[in-house]
Image: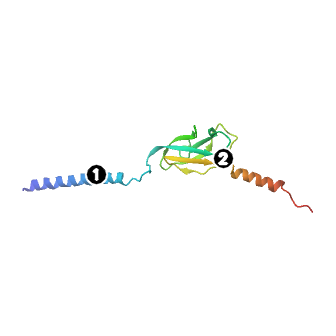
Amino acid sequence: MTSKSAILFAALAIIMSLGALGTYIFDLERVFKIEGTVTGSFVSRVRLETNCEITNDAFAVHNLRTKENTSFRYGEAFVRVKADDELKLVVHEDFPNFELNSSPIDAQKQLILSYDCNNSPRLEGIFSSMNEQFGTQPTD
């Protein structure tokens, strides 16, 4: 074997090794993806569960990153999100007299947002304030 053919053989071996290593590394990315974990953008299917007497149309999903609201239709909303987005249940703009407070939640492929109209911290605060102001006071 001449020195030229030895150099050519070594170069081909290095190129093939780099190709195999590259394929292995790119395949590892696919292998290590965890089931259900999403990277990039996707559509989140958000279902609404509530015991409120008002229509589900009074609610919307708010994406904190994009500042966009998506309405519920038939108890579901489909929101385009990124993996690190946070969503929040809000009042639809068509219902200005209704108010709610909800906490943000991380975006997922499928999500259930719930709201209990019977247990409103705002209403409890109003009633306790009224009780303090107008409640029975001891008479002398």
x%, y% of residue 30? 35, 51
Can you say which quadrant of the picture contains the C terminus? bottom right
x%, y% of residue 57? 62, 38
Classify mark 1: residues with Cα within 10 Å, few (<14), some (14-19) or many (20+): few
- Mark 2 or mark 1, which has the lower sequence index? 1
Work out whether 57 lies above or below 106: above
- Helix, strand or loop at label 1? It is helix
**28 left or right, relative to 61:** left
Name of the residue lying farthest toward the bottom: 140
All told, the count of numbered labels is 2
- Which residue is located at x 21 percent, y 52 percent? 16
Q: Which residue is mark 2?
A: 100
**75 left or right, relative to 118:** left
x%, y% of residue 109? 48, 46
Q: Which residue is mark 1?
A: 23
Classify mark 2: residues with Cα within 10 Å, few (<14), some (14-19) or many (20+): some
Badge 2 vs badge 1, beta-carbon distance below 8 Å? no
**28 left or right, relative to 129:** left
Name of the residue lying farthest toward the left: 1
Give, as a three-letter code, the residue at label 1. Answer: Thr
Give, as a three-letter code, the residue at label 2. Answer: Leu
Instruction: In the rendered structure, find residue 56 and report the number of the disc placed on it.
Output: none
x%, y% of residue 106? 53, 51
- Helix, strand or loop at label 2? It is loop
Q: Report which quarter residue 70 is drawn in.
A: top right
- Which residue is located at x 86 percent, y 59 percent? 137
Can you say which quadrant of the picture contains the N terminus? bottom left
Nearer to us in this view, 21 or 76: 76
Name of the residue lying farthest toward the right: 140
